[in-house]
Amino acid sequence: MIEAKDLNFSYDVDILKNIAFSISESSICTILGPNGSGKSTLLKILDKLLKPKKGTVLIENENLENLSIKNVAKKIAYLAQENEVSFSFSVFDIVLTGRAHNVGMLNQPSKEDIKIAKKAISLVGLQNLINKPFTQLSGGQKRLVLIAQALAQEAKILLFDEPTNHLDFSNQYAILNLIKNLIKKHNLTAIITLHDPNLAAWISDIVIMIKNGSLLKFGPVKSIMNAQNLSELYETKITVINNNGKLFITPLEFI
Amino acid sequence: MKNTILIVLSFVVIVVSLGVGPYKIAPIDVVKCFFNPKASIDSTIVLDIRLPRVLFAYFVGAGLSAAGSAYQAMFKNPLVSPDILGVSGGAAFGAALAILTLNHFYFIEIFAFVFGTIAVYIAFFLAKSKQELPVLNLVISGIIVGSFFTALLGIIKYLADPNNQLPQIVFWLMGSFANVSFSAWGAFIIIGICVVFLYLLRWQLNIAAFGDDEAKSLGVNIINLRKIIILLSTLTTAASVAVVGIIGWVGLIIPHISRLISGSDNRNVMPTSIFVGGIFMVIIDDLARSLISGEIPVGILTSLLGAPFFAWLYKKQKRL
């Protein structure tokens, strides 16, 4: 469903080198890698926010290059790491912008668009805060609003850049659990960048490991999330404890 | 509902304002002038002298406020006004240049409009990079262009004849609706069309207030959107300034007041800004021609009211 072929990207130095993978429908894929390894860059390329220097991305066998901005938004929703919201827009105002690809420049959102936005808000459980200003929400609630905005796009593919950023311990699980349920229930595909391999092991079907811009490993959680690969990825000794099929990952050096 | 009230209020304010001035006319007699085709002193004053003035004040107030609302959304900053890209600086230079060289009101308007637009084009050109149009670059290039044209204006003032031309330049810079007639139909049309389009764009302004990547991933061509907003706001502001001179603060404070009334959704802020801006400008112009026996330059009044209001808002920082 999503296929990356020989992706290369560089500013002055090479950021991504020969990245290739393919992810099938209704699966959750996590991108793991140390800081600066090129995870966010890769996500941006997949949403056509950055143009690869070389290589192609195929979305349902269509070349991403040939899709208009509007058509990309119909197929792919993207949640940035940080969102700047400068005015006190309400939760509803923000989620409704998810319908932008369906609204002409001089037109206003239709009743149908409003209905879809409201449904997206209730899918993340924020219906009681629908008129509350975004700026007054907690970090976790803000994240939920942006997930609802992405759901309102009705795209089949969702890209999340560090959705657990700035969230407390239990909220990290709560958000990812919600994402997991939504993806499975609505037959969507998600690509997520994460820093915590524990969360990655718990939520993903597939993992992409990127180190210094190159693909280190790509495959199902069970076959590649092992001590050897993770130690190589993060350049520190890591142990993986398997507790009845659940993986617990921790660096050895510091404990 | 709010908009209906504001539309009704607009009509009331316009009708009452047509009677305001050294020669006072009761609102009921103002209305009669519209239905009585016979020429009288009242109808000459109302229809020929005050109607274009009051209507243009409404258009300018509405236009500057619409442009201000659009810019505040686009620059993601509630402290931005329509002259951020140097349009007023350019227009002031153009008007002064026309006063110095050709000195005919027609050329003053044309020069002010053209140089106002050129100033913004230069700022736009400086800010633009290959595939991007970052708002921070626009702010910086706007400051550069604005101060460059202010320097040029300084040269013109220095060269101007101090007995005749210099006072004319100074008065032009203070802004006034006193000489507006329907001969300014071009400005009426430009402002009218731009305000309609800014009104239609109102929902897109919510998206313009997001970051570049967010807007793009939502399916909006943010660069084109910015270009259109700049074009419409520049034409509106340049057309206003060309006819009536520099009028500050309106495009900054009216969007604030509108957000206090309507919340942050630009679908509501834009119509509120247009109506409140129009009403505000008409009332300010009423004060300008009735407070003292002569005319007070309207730019002085807007600053006199705008600055303290802004100070209050700045202290309060509530729902900016």
Image: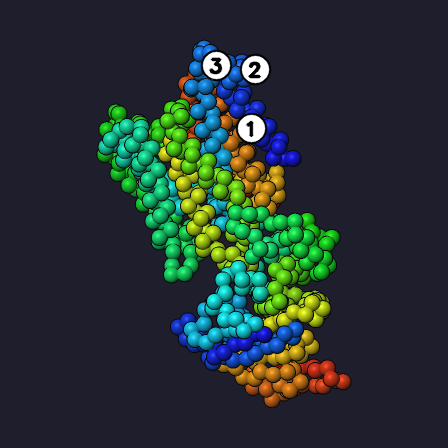
Q: Amino acid at mark 3?
A: Pro
Image coordinates of residue A249 in percent, x first then y, are 67, 82
The chain ID associated with circle 2 is B
Q: Is residue B14 above or below residue A4?
A: above
Residue of label 3: B37
Marks 1/3 in contact by CB < 8 Å: the verdict is no
Counting residues from the start of the chain, the first of labels 1 and 3 encountered is 1
Residue of label 2: B28
SS of the residue under disc 2: helix
Q: Are marks 2 and 1 on the same chain?
A: yes
Q: Which mark is residue B10?
A: 1
Which of the two discs, 1 and 3, sits closer to the camera?
A: 3
Residue A166: image quadrant is bottom right
The residue at the far bottom in this view is A228
- Residue B189 as seen in the image, left or right of residue A163: left
Which quadrant does the N terminus of chain A fall into?
bottom right
Q: Amino acid at mark 2?
A: Ile
- Tell me what residue is drawn at x 54 percent, y 76 percent: A3
- Tell me what residue is drawn at x 58 percent, y 47 percent: A108
- Residue A6 as seen in the image, left or right of residue A194: left
The residue at the far right in this view is A244
Which of the two discs, 2 and 3, sits closer to the camera?
A: 3
Image coordinates of residue B107 in percent, x first then y, are 29, 32
Counting residues from the start of the chain, the first of labels 2 and 3 encountered is 2
The chain ID associated with circle 1 is B
Image coordinates of residue B268 in percent, x first then y, are 59, 42
Q: Residues within 10 Å of mark 3 (few under 14, many from 20)?
A: few
Q: Is residue B13 above or below residue B270?
A: above
